[in-house]
Amino acid sequence: MKYVLVTGGVVSGLGKGVTASSIGVLLKACGLRVTSIKIDPYLNTDAGTMSPFEHGEVFVLDDGGEVDLDLGNYERFLDIKLTRDNNITTGKIYQSVINKERRGDYLGRTVQVPVNTISLAFLHGLTSFDKTKPTQHSVRGLRGLGLTPHILACRSVTALDENVKEKLSQFCHVPAANIITLHDVSNIWHIPLLLRDQKAHEAILRVLNLLCKVTREPILEEWTSRAELCDRLHDPVRIAMVGKYTGLSDSYLSVLKALLHASTVCHRKLIVEWVPATDLEDTTAKEAPDVYKAAWRLLRGADGVLVPGGFGDRGVQGKILAAKYARENNKPFFGICLGMQIAVIEYSRSVLGLQDANSTEFDPDTKNPCVIFMPEGSKTHMGGTMRLGSRRTYFQVTDCKSAKLYGNVKYVDERHRHRYEVNPDMILELEDAGLSFVGKDETGRRMEILELPTHPYFVGVQFHPEFKSRPGKPSALFLGFVAAACSQLETVMQTSSHVNKAAAVCGQLETVMQTSSHVNKAAAINSSSNGKIPKAYRSGNKSKPANGPLNGTLYSNGNGVHA
C-alpha cells in the first residue's frame, strides 16, 4: 500500500479534489489499483447536516454514508464505489475515541490528542499567479510542521513560465521536473491529460519507488476522446434547473455532472438555466416583476425542466408551478426526490382537484396528505436518520420509458436520501387519474418511479440517480431526460423489449444497430470495437473487473452501460 497525500490552502474551489481525482485516473491508467480518502478537519461526524450553501451538495454512497462532494469526484473519475470509511473527519475520530473511553477501553489511562506525523509521498497543491512568494510561504509553513513536499501542483490561469518553475524549485527545494502546472482548461476531463503530458505519473512513481515496477504508459485514449468530443460540441440543449440553492452551483454538483454525461452522449452542449424557485411565485410577481418575468422567460425557453432534491418549504410553490408548466406544455420533466414529490402534489391539486393537497413536511395539518413522513424516520435526530444508501427498485411494468432506458432489467439499485414518501393510500386514486407508478420497493408500498404515460417525458424518482452517473456511462434516466429534450428519446429507446442499449466509450450517440429481439444495441461504437457489437450482460450475470479495459464487453447494472 502506497499513499499520495494532496493538500493545499483553506480556500475551497481551487481544484484539490479534481487534482486528487486526476492523479488517481493517471495512476489507474498505468495499471495500478487506486482508491481515495478525503480527510476533513471539521468536528461534524459527517456532511449530512451541513448547509449546501457552505459546503455544496451532500454526496451519498452505497452504504448510506453522507460525505463531502469530493468523494463524488473520486467515484466519477475513478469509476469506483467508496464507503463512509473513505471520508474521515475530526468529529468522527473524536466520537470514536470518546465512545471507547466511555466503554472503558483505555483502562483508566489519560486520553490525549497526539501530534500527527505523516510520511510517504506528499503532493502539495497551491495557487500561483506567476508570483512565487505565496507558494514559498506555504511550503515554509509545511516544512515547519515536519512535512516535505515532493511535488508542487501549481494552480494558474495559464501555463507557468520556465523561469517561474526554476525560482520555485530553487526556493522550495523541489526539483523543477516535479513542479506541475495546473492551468485553466476547456473542461475538467483535460486535467488527467495535463498531468500525463507533464509526466506527473513518473514523478509520483519515482517518489513511491515504483518507477521500475510500473513500466506501462498511461492508457487514456477513451479519456482523450471524451475530452476532445466535449470541446467540439456546439448545438445546445437548455435545461432549466428549478431549485432552492441555485446561488451555489456546487449544491447540485452531481446533478450537473450527470446532465453533462448525458448531453455529451447526445452530442449536445449543455446549458443550464438557473431558475430560483421563489422567482416563479406570485409573491415575486408583486414585489419584483422584472425578476418574475425573467425567471418565467428562462423556464419557457428551456428544452427540459429539472426539479432536484431539497429540504424545507422555501420555493415549493415555484417548483409546483414549474412541474405544472412542464406537464401541461409537453415539456420534458425530471423530478428527483423532492422533485418527484412536487410532481405528485401538483397532480393531486390540478388533476384530482384536491386544492389543499400537500406534503406533511410543508403542511402537517393538510387534509389531503399526498406525501407523508416515513414511519421509520426520526423527528428528533437529523444526522444519519433518513432512508439512506443503495435500495432496490422493482419495475411494475415493462412497457414504460424508465424500464426501457434501464435495459428492461427487473430491478435497479439506486441511492436514496429522504425522510418523506408518496402516501401509499393515495396511489390508487392517482393512478386512476392517469399517473403511473412504474417502480416500487420490495414491499410494493413505497413509490420509487412515476411516469405520465401520455407525456413525451414526465418522470419522477424518489432516489438520486445522479450519484451513480459516470463519464461515458450516464445515468439511464438522465440520458432519457436529455435525449427527450433534444428530440433523441426514440433513438435511445428503439429496439424490442429484450434489447439493452450501450452508450459508446466516447459517449457518442450515432446509428443504433438493431438486430433480433435478444441482441443488444450499441450507440456509437468507437473505433476500438472495429464496428462489431460488443457482448452485453444484464444485471447480475457477470461482474465488472476491478481495473483495466473490458476489451469491448459491456455490462448493464441499472446505471447505464459500463464500457
Image (spheres, rainbow, N blue to C red):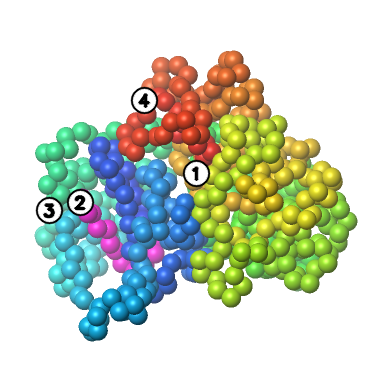
Q: Is residue 118 above or below residue 560?
A: below
In this figure, which residue is indicated by the disc labeled 2? Answer: 2
Q: CA distance from mark 2 to mark 1?
A: 28 Å
Which quarter of the picture shows residue 432?
A: top right
Q: CA distance from mark 3 to mark 4?
A: 39 Å
Work out whether mark 3 precedes mark 2 in sequence or the reverse, and give the earlier one.
2
Q: Quadrant of the C terminus?
A: top left
Which quarter of the picture shows residue 387?
A: bottom right
Going by the numbered disc 1, the residue's amino acid type is Ser
The span picked out in magenta is 1-15
Q: CA distance from mark 2 to mark 4?
A: 28 Å
Give the left or right position of residue 368, taking residue 228 as reference. right
Depth-wise, is mark 2 or mark 1 nearer the camera?
2
Asked whether residue 181 appears in the rendered view, the answer is: yes
Q: Answer whether residue 248 is magenta in the image.
A: no
Q: CA distance from mark 3 to mark 1?
A: 39 Å
In this figure, which residue is indicated by the disc labeled 1? Answer: 469
Q: CA distance from mark 1 to mark 4?
A: 21 Å
Q: Residue furthest right?
A: 353
Q: CA distance from mark 3 to mark 2?
A: 21 Å
Do the numbered discs 1 and 4 sit on residues whose CB atoms are within 8 Å?
A: no
Locate residue 272, reporting x and y percent.
58, 49
Work out whether mark 3 precedes mark 1 in sequence or the reverse, and give the earlier one.
3
Q: Mark 3: which secondary structure?
A: loop
In this figure, which residue is indicated by the disc labeled 3? Answer: 175
The kind of secondary structure the magenta stretch mainly shows is: loop
- Residue appearing at x 22%, y 34% in the figure: 217
Query: Residue 530 — which label?
Result: none
